[in-house]
Image (cartoon, rainbow, N blue to C red):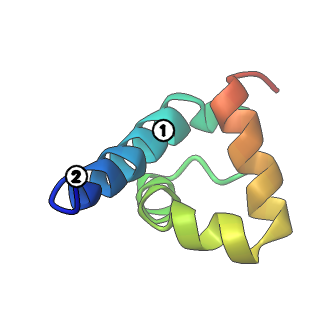
Amino acid sequence: MVKIIPFIVLAVYLAGIWKFIQGYNCTNFSRQLPTKLMLSLLWPILVIVNGSYRQNFQKALKGRE
């Protein structure tokens, strides 16, 4: 069971990146590729520490503005 935990964490992380990128156009963020990549890769930290990002992340996950 302990050996599978890193794979579960990685799967959740990658799923978060995928969903965020798919709904990125629903956010208020800049449409530039470097911004999109940075915000996608840092999503777990930003969701915890930044309320504005958290709201935009929810918009991206829902896929609507």
Residue 18: image quadrant is top left
- Relative to 16, say whether 47 is above or below: below
Mark 1 belongs to which amino acid? Ile
Residue tagged by mark 1?
21
Quadrant of image for the N terminus: bottom left
Image x and y of residue 48, in percent: 69, 71
> Is residue 28 visible in this depiction of the protein?
no
Quarter occupied by residue 52: bottom right
| Mark 1 or mark 2, whichever is nearer to me | 2
Tell me: residue 39, above or below residue 62.
below
Figure label count: 2
State left or right for residue 24 relative to residue 40.
Answer: right
- Write the residue at 22% across / 62% down: 2
Residue at 28% of width from left, 57% of height from top? Answer: 5
> Which residue position is annotated with label 2?
7
In this view, the residue in front, 32 or 44, is: 44
- SS type, badge 1: helix
Other residues around mark 2 within 10 Å, as few (<14) / some (14–19) / many (≥20): few
Q: Residue at x 65, y 33 (%)?
A: 61
Percent from the top left, x then y, of residue 9?
Answer: 35, 56
Left or right: 50, with 63 as reference point: right
Q: Give how far across and how far down residue 62 sits, in percent.
A: 71, 26
Label 1 or label 2, whichever comes before in sequence order? 2
